[in-house]
Image: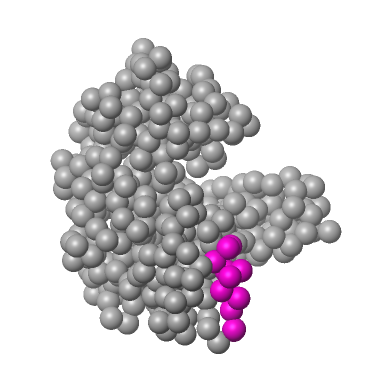
Amino acid sequence: MKSIFILGASRLQVPAIKKAKERGLFVYAIDYDPNAVGIAFADKFLEISTIDKEAVYKAALEYKPDYIITSTSDMPVRTVSWVCEKLNMKTDISYQGALYATDKVAMRKRMKDCGVPIPEFHEVGSLSEFIETADSMPSRFILKPSDNAASRGVILIDKNDNPDYEQLYKYCTGFSRGGAVLVEEFMEGPEVSVESFSVNGEPHIITITDKIVTELPFFVELGHTEPSRLSAEQQKDILKVADSAIRAIGMENGPTHTEIKVTPTGAKLVEIAARLGGDFITSRLVPLSTGVDMTDCSFASLSGEEVQCECRFHRGAAIRFIQGKKGVLSEIRGCSVSRNMPGIEEVEIYMNPGDSIRKPENSSDRVGHIIATGRDAEEASKNAEEALKQIEVIVV
């Protein structure tokens, strides 16, 4: 029996673990968290941090997996590429390409060199440098850590609010593993993600996903809808930027999740990830709206099979995340009602009574989600929103 290392065993990695089992693989789930939900679906658990490439390499020498992957996590992409290159194993993207896709400073510089439209950006490494840079920026700008994900540490700064630069810098650097942060132009306009799969260096765009985020100053994703409802002209511009960004990181064989803002001056890259899209976009929404199973595409590519990434149909799919007010969770009402409403595929709650919750500042603050389908994006969105209205999060 062939075996596989899957780096990450969180809720979002479960579809990949299950798919590997369906394909008859012996699955090693690797995670720093011994309580990760995906462990229950794997054959063996290895308690190793997914970003500790030396430890993963040592484990690979011991257990000799046939394949090593991650599915929806950013930083493990580096580990996978580095370990695979050390072992002369097949990898979707080079280690250098993985750095372009996971380090926001390296990403911005690479995109600028390749002519990909991006916002104005500045790398800063100290409070004094941040204050000096902030003074030169427009009234509103973005501060974000260079090497994190899931909106952790990303915040909008408005000079009109007399911001405490020292406090904001401390907040952001608290989420930066290497200490570097980015000061960026704030881009106005709708945001989307582009789900794509590359085969022999050629990107195949599968769909464009509309995104809903929290009210400013944070940027936590609260919903996604497919296919995009933006105009044909806007979508053409989006696809051009996505294609050039995918080629810039050198994705050879594998999925990409590209986030783009449609600004008054055209589409600009927010970020690109050399992995499947999280938030159940590629594991649930893409199959429901297009018939393409991108998780299975990843395994087909690994094993040298033909990758089936052409859309089989066009329907609507949407996810809406449940949020709550600050407090201690007492109970959640309305789930059973929501589950029985038209078009509802799934209602899942992440938290338990007694857990502390708050208004979302990053993705881990969300309480649960609802997934819905429809004949088109409009109907799927409506079904999800109507079901969401039935959910009541009670806090004390």
Q: Position of residue 170 (x, y in %)?
A: 58, 63
Q: Is residue 339 visible?
A: no
Image quarter of residue 190: bottom left
Main SS of the magenta part reads helix
Q: Position of residue 348 (x, y in %)?
A: 61, 47
Please tell me which residue is depicted at 64% across the width and 46% down the height of the picture: 350
Q: Residue furthest front?
A: 128
Looking at the image, residue 327 sits to the left or right of residue 286; the answer is right
Please tell me which residue is depicted at 32% across the width and 82% down the height of the picture: 264
- Residue 256 is one of the magenta-drawn residues: no
Please tell me which residue is depicted at 33% across the width and 29% down the height of the picture: 83
- Residue 168 is one of the magenta-drawn residues: yes
Q: Is residue 180 visible?
A: yes
Looking at the image, residue 285 sits to the left or right of residue 112; the answer is right
Residues rendered magenta in the picture: 161-171
Observer-nearest of 108 and 239: 108
Image quarter of residue 263: bottom left
Please tell me which residue is depicted at 35% across the width and 40% down the height of the picture: 78
Q: Position of residue 297 (x, y in %)?
A: 30, 37
Looking at the image, residue 375 sits to the left or right of residue 240; the answer is right
